[in-house]
Each structure stands twice: as structure tokens, then as C-alpha cells.
Amino acid sequence: MKQKNYKSNIRRIFLVLLVLAFLTPIGLLTQNPTFGEWSQEEIKKMLGFVPEGIKKYADIYKFDLFDGYTVKFIKNDYIGYILSAIIGIVVIFALFYILKFVMAERK
Amino acid sequence: MNLHIPDGYLSPQTCATFYAVSAAAVGYAFNKFRKQADEKTYIQLSVASAFTFIVMMFNFPVVGGSSAHITGIPLITFLFGPMASTVASSVVLIIQALLFRDGGILALGTNIFNMAVAIPLTAVLISKLLEKLGLKNEKVRIFISSYFAMNIAALLTAIELGLQPLLFTKAGKPLYFMYDLKTTIPAMMIPHLLVVAVVEAAMTVLLYSPLKNFVAINAEERRGVVS
């Protein structure tokens, strides 16, 4: 009986996460620029120059398939955002699954 | 506004320091966590991590014409304890940096310190302090400590960014982040004090009670009290 409750609870939580994933584009509605998240062009406009360190390190990491929760080959930002949410959740679950597995082996 | 610092804004010295501190803190937390964790804990924590990840995608406008998001980290802290919370939120921050370029790779240690280490620690310490001071109401305690924890994270971010132009310049020009404490502290603190921390604290109180029962039921099942 309790086991059944637990499973239905888990199912309910997965459903809530999925619904939230589909609602994430609400987060795109604000177009306000964020303090401290400027691109190099924006910094150049603000200061007249780009600090050396920013030039050197800003793009040190190259992987940009899902840059900023968009998906490179999907034009629609909203769909890209939802996809990013789902990809993020799947990767998190996978990581914890591996972690659980590794920890069980070590015991 | 955003607590996620990108690459290039912090000097390598700052990044290295916080990588060392965060590695120690997260290592300690994970070690403590895995000793008390069983299979169900991992499942519950993966759900908690996923929730944190999703919540951070909901940007909303804040005062000063900027935008911000809440973190969900105080909620996980009160549900699962500070060690599990540090583990879960570190996982989220690592994935955000590696996969979505939200927060830098060099800045990852700093971002983990500000959010995954400082928020759970502050939330728990303030809550315990309030309890000692005789504040009986659990909801009020959770609200106040979540509010504090979020503002501490914002303050840490503001100080780390604001110190850059004071410490690292070349020929009078900033090498990394360009605005000093006079700008970063109000820019980070005003929206967090007035909006972000209030929303975070309210969300934490609202979801804590229903979810607490869910976690508690499972805890009892695990101990074999309920068959």
C-alpha cells in the first residue's frame, strides 16, 4: 500500500517537472538585460574598450550547442528553451543514476 | 543581478582560490552525504536537482530594469539538509556551465561557492540561531533564513566582482570586471533585498510543508517503521 503511494507520488512529481519544463519559456518574456552578463560588444559600447582579461578568457570554453538555453539548430527560442529544460533534467537524472550505481558498487 | 558569473569577469587568481575552497567544501559535503544515503535518497535528490535547474530558468523582471531568477536551493536545504543540498546544487551548476554556458568554466568554483556552499550553510546557521533565540514558528524561521541566505549569495557575488578593478589593473585600465564595489553592491543587493530573496523565501515556505511530509514518509519507510 505504502509502496504504491510512493510510486504514484514519484509519478506525480515527474509530471510536475514536465509541466514546469513546458512553462519555462515564461522566463524568456522579460527582455531586460542582466547586470554582469554583457557580451564583449556590449562592454565595448559601455566603456569604449574591452578589458584584456575579458577578451582573453570570455570564450575560453568553446562548446556552444546549447549556449544560453537555445539549441543551435532550432530557430525558435521557445522550443529551444523547452528542449534545454528537458535535456537538463535528463542529464541530471542520468548523473544521479550513475552516482547511485557507483556508490552501491563501493559499499 | 544574476548570481552566475561568466568567464573573463574574474582574475585567474580569484578563480583558483575559489576552486580550491569549493573543491574542499563539496568533497566534504559529498562524503557526509553518501554515508547516510541509500537508493531512494539518490532518486529524491535527482528530483530536487532537476527542480532547482528548472526554477533557475524562470527569469523575471526586477527593479532597476534588469532581470533575475530564484534558485530553489534554500528549499532543498530545509528538505534534505545542507550536505545533500550542496551536492544537488553543485550538480546543477556544473551542468549549467558545461552544457548551457550559464556561468563560466573558470568561474565555476566561485559560482559553486556563492550558491551551492554559501546558501545552504547560511540558511541552516540562521535557522539554528533563530531557534536558539526562541523563535518557535517554523515557517517564519524558514522565511527569514532563506531570505538571508539569498542576500548573502548576492553580497558575495557583488564583492568578488567589485574587487576585480581594485586589485587587477593595467595602465589604469581594469583587466577583468570593470565596476567597483560602489556599483556592484547596490546593483546586486537592491534587487535581491527587495525582490529575489522575498520571492525565494515565499516559495520555500509555500512548498516546504507539503514536500516535507513526502520526504518524511519515505524516511520512515526506509527505517522500516512503516511497512
Image: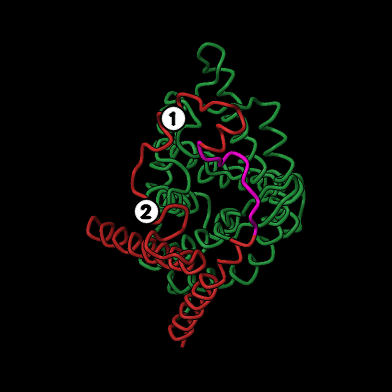
Chain colours: A red, B green
What residue sits 44% from the left and 69% below the top? B223
* Residue A65 relative to residue B123: left or right: left
Crowd tier of the residue under label 1, counting other residues whose Cα lies within 10 Å: few below 14, some 14–19, many 20 or above: some
Q: CA distance from mark 1 to mark 2?
A: 41 Å
What residue sits 60% from the left and 27% below the top? A47
Q: Nearer the viewer, residue B144 or B34?
A: B144
What residue sits 52% from the left and 67% below the top? A78
Q: Nearer the viewer, residue A48 or B131?
A: A48
User: Residue B47's spot in the image, x, y percent?
Assistant: 46, 66
Residue under disc 1 on the same chain as residue under disc 2:
no
Residue tagged 2: B34
Q: Quadrant of the N terminus of chain B?
A: top right
Specify the subunit that label 1 lies on: A
Where B10 sits versus B43, above or below? above
Task: Single out the residue that lies furthest toward the top.
Answer: B171
User: Residue A99's spot in the image, x, y percent?
Assistant: 31, 58
Residue tagged 1: A55
Specify the subunit that label 2 lies on: B
User: Residue B213's spot in the image, x, y percent?
Assistant: 59, 72
Displayed quadrant of residue B188: top right
Give the number of the disc on residue B17: none
| Range drawn in magenta | A30-40
What residue sits 69% from the left and 43% below the top? B129
Prevailing SS of the magenta stretch: loop
What SS does tag 2 mark?
helix
- What's under tag 2, amino acid-wise? Arg
- Residue B171 on the magenta segment: no
- Residue A35 on the magenta segment: yes
- What's under tag 1, amino acid-wise? Lys
What SS does tag 1 mark?
helix
